[in-house]
Image (tube, rainbow, N blue to C red):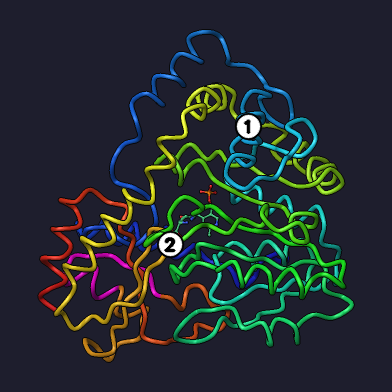
Amino acid sequence: FPSRLPQVGTTIFSTMSALATEHGAVNLGQGFPDFDCDPALVNAVTRAMQSGHNQYPPMPGVPALRQAVAAKIEALHARQYCANSEITITAGATQAILTAILACVQPGDEVIVLEPCYDSYVPNIELAGGVVVRVPLTPGSFRPDFGKIAAALTPRTRLIIVNTPHNPSATVWTEADMRTLEELLAPTNVLLISDEVYEHMVFDGAIHQSAARFPGLAERAFIVSSFGKTFHVTGWKVGTVAAPVPLTAEFRKVHQFNVFTVNTPVQYGLAGYLRDPAPYLQLPAFYQAKRDLFRQGLEGSRLRLLPSTGSYFQCVDISAVSNLSESDFCQWLTREIGVAAIPLSAFYGDSFDQRVVRFCFAKKDETLRTALQRLRRL
Ligand code: PMP
Ligand code: GLN
């Protein structure tokens, strides 16, 4: 039968992780921590299982978790979301994004993505029958180019997807960026998916500018986050969507016939664990130390460091080291040097090669040191 996604193969993250395993390479490719989460969180989930929280929870999620998420957003961004009608617990951010797209994009609707972008966005839009409109972030700086975004808006634009802190470029949108987006969208009915999965990984004193802080954005936004990133549990696949009542209502229509709901004991465990803000408030310092360790280790090498202001990624320019394409370089680096990375071209539709690759520094310090020893040979 005809493929719904004829262009799609295996994701770069699976491919590079498999290659890293095959060659015994240090895996700085796929973004996930190689250290464990807080044992208190495991205990909280274990206790939830032992106390019988093992059947279907309510469709939108365990109420105590939705309340904890609403309280967290209010504390951090001074916006109130109703836990009953505006917060939904999802099976990770990936499901949240697909569900939001399926809920609002009709066949033929245009959806703006800012390239480079996370690899699930484009296939998700295609599954909904939407028309993908690719707007490049400014080459080199990866800053939003609002002139280009404005030029891409048409009466058929239904949705724009924004991601800050940004995967893969590790840039962070400023307050002025968000205000400009708010002004740009003000005269339109365009909806927004604000992918904020790296919300707690911002460095050098930067403040995460959630769409929740901007009334003109919040009123049109599905704000997506992921406990996988925030609490070092990417394998648990639990995320959240905060959106105004009409958007949440449409979101839940799709959600209930997609996953229906999300695993119960993890939600109970997270609900209790979220009462203490310390674990996520410590995250910027925790990851900034890892970023600095990794960057310092590469100083003086021929890999040119790009800025990393947020997320757990560090991009480097490889042009002084190799003439290979990004993609070939990542394969070679994994096989011959023993470190896996992700080519930036994987985040573009047309394999645009700018000689930049992405490393993930969400790793134990000893893992980073082993990788650095190998990378310094380049
Ligand atoms: N958006 C971005 C930008 C991501 O980097 C990721 C994780 N790689 C996701 C969404 C998906 O998050 P989750 O694992 O919660 O599905
Ligand atoms: N978000 C992770 C990354 O960018 C990978 C997630 C996945 O493997 N799908 O590396």
Residue at screen point 18% across, 72% down: 298
Q: Residues within 10 Å of mark 1 (few under 14, many from 20)?
A: many
Q: Is residue 167 left or right of residue 62?
A: left
Compared with 355, 249 (above or below) is above
Task: Check disc 1 and report its element: helix, strand or loop.
Answer: loop
Local packing at callout 2 (Cα closer than 10 Å; few below 14, some 14-19, many 20+) is many
Name the residue rendered at 50%, 79% in the picture.
Answer: 142
- Give the extent of the magenta segment: 331-343
Q: Earlier in the sequence, mark 2 or mark 1?
A: 1
Of 279 and 370, the residue lying toward us: 279
- Residue 120, percent across and down? 59, 61
Q: Quadrant of residue 156?
A: bottom right
Q: What amino acid is found at the position of numbered circle 2 in the picture? A: Gly
At 77% across and 30% down in the image, what residue appears?
A: 84
Q: Residue furthest top?
A: 51
Label 1 beta carbon less than 8 Å to ligand 1: no
Q: Quadrant of the N terminus?
A: bottom right
Residue highlighted by disc 1: 262
Q: Is residue 365 magenta?
A: no
